[in-house]
Amino acid sequence: MNVDVLVCGAGCAGSAAALAASRAGAKVMVIEKAPFAGGIITCVGLPYFDGIANIRDNRIVVRGIALELLSKSGVCAPDAKTVSKHNPTIPNSFEFKLLLDNLFREQKGSLSILFNSFVCGVESLGGRIKTVHVANKDGLVALHPKVVIDCTGDADVAAWAGAPYEQNTEVQPLTLHFRIGHVKKNIDMTKNCREALAKAVVRGDLPFYYGPGVMFLYGDDEVYIHGVR
């Protein structure tokens, strides 16, 4: 199968790259291992649009498709110059999935996406990727793109293609994001968690670490927790 642009990964970066290429007239194929797009916001559950605004004055410094997604999520106006905080929160991760689906659907004819699909290998010639192998329920598929955009998050495609890279032997541990429903909102919850962990560190029961984040972002009876590593 021949395509102009192959985007590997449909997270926030990959979705923006695919939409931009498609709107510019390219024939685009997107490969995504999850059954939906959105990456860190929808798969991981981290709802923040970090980096879109200046941390000092909340002035929007990244516009384009990033601002389009933020405004269509109801966070700000399309022509907004500032936001209420430097890392605005996407109010509903499920609605964000639907928003991306609808934007992809608007590009029907020039953009197609394969969910539940994995890039499993590449073939390069003369320093350029000629073939990308994809695996899914239909088996193995060979794609022949003119351009490949690696948005896998781990630079898998670039590394397999022979691009130079560095990897530190000391890596950061993974963490877990989760939400618990039917929780009575308590303004002291975060403070109490912090104090309990601080005491555990002093006792030697826990090593010092970042976290956890305990927030009521999605509703008064639903607590969002992250940074539990």
Image (cartoon, grey):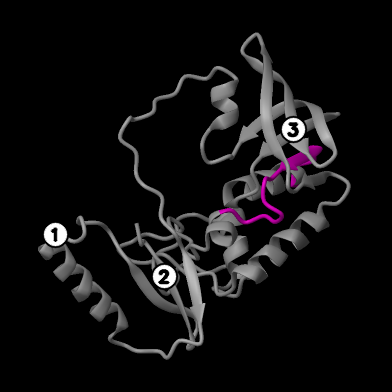
- Badge 2 crowding class, 10 Å Cα cut-off, few under 14, some 14 to 19, many 20 or more, is many
Q: Secondary structure at mark 2?
A: strand
Among the two numbered marks 3 and 1 on one chain, the one whose residue lies closer to the N terminus = 3
Percent x, y of residue 117: 73, 42
Which kind of residue does numbered mark 3 sit on? Answer: Val
Q: Which residues are magenta?
A: 23-39
Q: Residue furthest left?
A: 202
Q: How far is mark 3 from mark 1, CA to CA?
A: 47 Å
Image height of 95 relative to 227, above or below: below
Identify the residue at horizontal 37%, vertical 59% (top origin).
54
- Determine the CA span between mark 2 and mark 3: 34 Å
Tell me the chief SS of the magenta region.
loop
Question: Can residue 94 be found in the magenta stretch?
Answer: no
Task: Describe residue 102's horizontal placement relative to residue 57 as left or right.
Answer: right
Location of residue 40 in the rendering, given as x and y in whole percent from the top left corner? 53, 55
Residue extending farthest right: 109
Q: Which amino acid type is shown beneath numbered disc 2?
A: Ile
Dot 2 or dot 3, earlier in sequence: 3
Query: Which is more foreground, mark 1 or mark 2?
Result: 1
- Residue under numbered circle 1: 204
Q: Is residue 42 above or below residue 110?
A: below
Tags 3 and 1 touching, CB below 8 Å: no
Q: Residue drawn at (46%, 68%), measured in percent from left and top? A: 88
Residue of label 3: 134
For disc 2, the marked residue is 225
Circle 3: element type = strand
